Image (tube, rainbow, N blue to C red):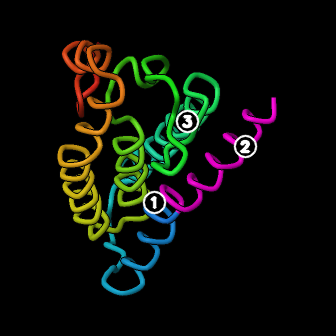
Amino acid sequence: MHRTRVAAAGSVAFLLAGPGLEAGVGPWLLVRIAGSEVDGWPAVLRVVGALLIVVGLAVLLDVFFRFVRDGAGTPSPAAPAQRLLARGAFAHLRHPMYVATATVIVGEALALAQPVLLAGALAYLTAMATLSHAVEEPRLARRFGAEYDAYRRAVPGWWPRR
């Protein structure tokens, strides 16, 4: 039980420091520095944006829940999951945290009529794809071996399977 509490506290801290900054503070700063509202965006785009924010946040919460419950750890390399995560959002994507965070940023762009955030989402995904390819996936392959290799073959990285 103590380990679960520690993992939960670590995951909450990582949620605030990672996606909280990436989809919260970062977009806010980008809009303050470079953004401007574009008049005339259709209401339907703003509604779609709000829905994307809700979906992205729901997936993020699932991901962090899975790190604690299924992985007995956190997303942080300092206290990593002890077991390979392959349920919930991880059953459909190898990188659901990054895709969900980008979904929130795209949702913010649409809901707030801030096209600069679309560029921000693209830059975020590019950085996370580079990080995952160069650092995270090799680390997971070393930690989980054949289990990760099978998971990697079965589950797409960035576009969810049906």
Q: Is residue 14 magenta?
A: yes
Callout in the foreground (2, 3): 2
Callout in the foreground (1, 2): 2
Q: Nearer the N terminus, badge 3 or badge 1? A: 1
What is the crowding at mark 1: few (fewer than 14 residues within 10 Å), some, or many (at least 20)? many
Q: Position of residue 144 (x, y in %)?
A: 35, 23
Image quarter of residue 147: top left
For residue 55, side relative to residue 10 (left or right): left
Q: Nearer the viewer, residue 147 or 27?
A: 147
For residue 116, side relative to residue 112 (left or right): left
Marker count (numbered): 3
Q: From which residue to which does the magenta span run?
A: 1-20
- Quote the CA–CA distance across marks 1 and 2: 25 Å
Q: Say which element carries label 1.
A: helix
x 49%, y 20%: residue = 88
Q: Say which element carries label 3.
A: helix
What is the crowding at mark 2: few (fewer than 14 residues within 10 Å), some, or many (at least 20)? some
Q: Say which element carries label 2.
A: helix
Say which residue label 3 marks.
58
- Quote the CA–CA distance across marks 2 and 3: 22 Å
Q: Nearer the viewer, residue 137 or 93?
A: 137
Q: Amino acid at mark 1?
A: Ala
x 28%, y 65%: residue = 120
Q: Nearer the N terminus, badge 1 or badge 2? A: 2
Q: Amino acid at mark 2?
A: Val
